[in-house]
Amino acid sequence: MWPSSSSRDVERRRAALRLALAGTSLHSVGLGFLVYGVTRRFLKAAGFDPSEELFYPRQSGAFLVALGIGYGGAALNPDRHAGLVALTIASKAIAVAFLLREARRRGGPRSVLAAGVADALLGLLIAGLALAYYPQRHSAAPEEAGETAHR
């Protein structure tokens, strides 16, 4: 499927995956704290009516923080936490489906469509990086693997 990769190529792919996961983690945690901490102002800026009950929007903020912590765990060690990488990809796919459906169904604020596009881009980026990294992580060029084993 993939051409044989050197250990340097594999490490670059791993670093790119870690960076994308870390950025996604920071984005989710930051957005979650924003939604939870300044809920009315956030809702108004996003084009929603902030006069409604705030429990569910605040719960969404807390949920974003929890997901962001999971994404961060994946960024720390994507080899050990491949399940968290899969969770990141799955949660982005679910978010995209929800956001695009809501944008189409309700014709709501443009922020809903923008969030769907952003989540789609992040999910595709992480999925692509994971597909480039995981199949190659144990198949670095044999001569380099042998050199590493003897050091």
Image (cartoon, rainbow, N blue to C red):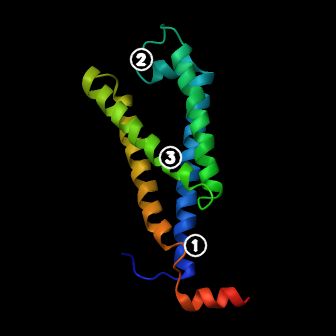
Where is residue 119 shown, x and y percent of the image? 42, 42
Q: Secondary structure at mark 3?
A: helix
Residue type at mark 3 is Thr
Which residue corresponds to the image point at 57% horizontal and 58% vertical from the top-left? 19
Name the quadrant containing residue 96: top left
Circle 3 sits on which residue? 88
Report the disc number at residue 48: 2
Between the C-alphas of marks 1 and 2, the distance is 44 Å
Please name which of the two marks, 2 or 3, marks the residue nearer to the observer: 3
Name the quadrant containing residue 127: bottom left
Q: Secondary structure at mark 2?
A: loop
Residue type at mark 2 is Phe
Residue 131 visible in image: yes
Q: Earlier in the sequence, mark 1 or mark 2?
A: 1
Q: Earlier in the sequence, mark 2 or mark 3?
A: 2
Apparent side of residue 32 relative to residue 4 in the rendered image (left or right): right
Report the disc number at residue 118: none
Q: Secondary structure at mark 1?
A: helix
Which residue corresponds to the image point at 29% horizontal and 29% vertical from the top-left? 101
